[in-house]
């Protein structure tokens, strides 16, 4: 099967596997209690218990069952479902989630990764103001089924920005994400892309005193892939990948993914400088 055809099949599978029913969810999985604020992945099943009382149970081939607490916040339900639960569904079905936001240009995906608070969503919104459509926010799902091409599945999450990020990017503010989260949903300034596309580049966001764009090569690529969000560990667990299997996966991916480092000061007055560097990287002017 051609890579993009395989990715479209994967999208259909995810849509099927994320079908929701509302019913009681057991408090334990395989005899292990999963208390508030905890989760457990075991074989083809994943159980998550939020701190406020939501419970989610995913079973492969069945879908997602959600138990609603006595005083529910629907906004919180959407956050868990589109976050950890979706990543678990992807991982169990052989799709690799990574902690990244991305834009699309010329039929390819340019992804930006970094720890929480690194500014991934803000950068994507700012690139949208320069005409580059959003591909995903916060979680990028990769289809690795073709050994010659890594294909990205389009994002399922809405763009979320802080009040400061809205001001910096000019994105249109929508409703508050949730009562306990000081962010707002926002419309991507250049819209978004809904079709799978090949991955062109992965760029790591870093703080620094002067804006700079640096390439990542050799063994450093391997090391950077090993230092990812908890989604990497979830994927490894779902695929029952031991250290040898994880090494083999990273050894395959490292030379296949062009990588960069985008260094930028955390100074609002200089924000446009780093956005310009990112835009030049995406459009091939760098």
Image: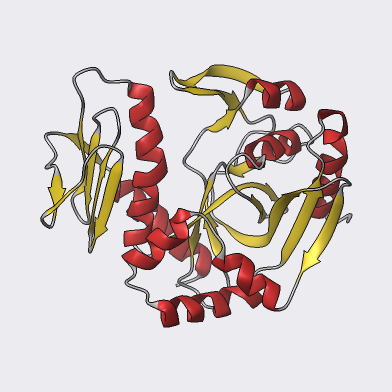
* Looking at the image, residue 254 lies above or below residue 205: below
Q: Residue at x 54, y 57 (%)?
A: 152
* Looking at the image, residue 257 lies above or below residue 41: below
Q: Position of residue 239 (x, y in %)?
A: 34, 69
Q: Residue at x 88, y 40 (%)?
A: 273
* The quadrant where residue 199 appears: bottom right
Look at the image and tell me in which quarter the N terminus lies.
bottom left
Q: Is residue 133 left or right of residue 159?
A: right
User: Which one is nearer the viewer's eye here, 56 or 60?
Assistant: 56
Q: Position of residue 28 (x, y in %)?
A: 14, 48
Q: Residue at x 83, y 43 (%)?
A: 274
User: Which one is nearer the viewer's eye here, 236 or 155?
Assistant: 236
* Looking at the image, residue 231 lies above or below residue 265: below
Q: Is residue 194 visible?
A: yes
Q: Residue at x 28, y 48 (%)?
A: 39
Look at the image and tell me in which quarter the C terminus lies.
bottom right
Q: Is residue 212 left or right of residue 78?
A: right
């Amino acid at each position: 099967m051609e890579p993009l055809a395989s990715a479209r099949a994967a999208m259909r599978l995810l849509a099927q596997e994320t079908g929701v029913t509302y019913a009681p969810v057991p408090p334990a999985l395989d005899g292990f209690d999963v208390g508030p604020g905890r989760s457990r992945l075991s074989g083809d099943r994943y159980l998550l218990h939020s701190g406020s009382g939501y419970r989610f149970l995913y079973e492969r081939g069945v879908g997602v069952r959600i138990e609603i607490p006595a005083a529910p916040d629907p906004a919180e339900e959407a956050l868990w479902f589109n976050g950890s639960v979706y990543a678990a569904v992807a991982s169990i079905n052989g799709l690799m989630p990574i902690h990244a936001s991305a834009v699309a240009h010329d039929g390819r995906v340019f992804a930006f990764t970094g720890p929480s608070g690194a500014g991934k969503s803000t950068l994507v919104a700012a690139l949208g103001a320069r005409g580059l459509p959003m591909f995903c926010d916060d979680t990028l799902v990769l289809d690795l089924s073709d050994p010659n091409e890594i294909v990205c599945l389009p994002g399922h999450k809405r763009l979320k920005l802080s009040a400061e990020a809205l001001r910096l990017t000019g994105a249109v503010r929508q409703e508050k994400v949730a009562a306990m989260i000081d962010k707002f949903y926002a419309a991507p300034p250049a819209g978004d892309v809904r079709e799978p596309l090949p991955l062109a580049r992965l760029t790591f966001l870093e703080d620094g005193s002067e804006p700079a764009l640096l390439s990542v090569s050799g063994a450093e690529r391997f090391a950077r892939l090993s230092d990812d969000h908890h989604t990497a560990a979830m994927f490894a667990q779902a695929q029952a990948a031991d250290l040898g299997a994880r090494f083999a996966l990273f050894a395959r991916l490292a030379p296949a993914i062009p990588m960069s480092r985008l260094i930028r000061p955390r100074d609002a007055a200089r924000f446009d400088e780093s956005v310009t560097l990112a835009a030049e990287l995406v459009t091939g002017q760098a």
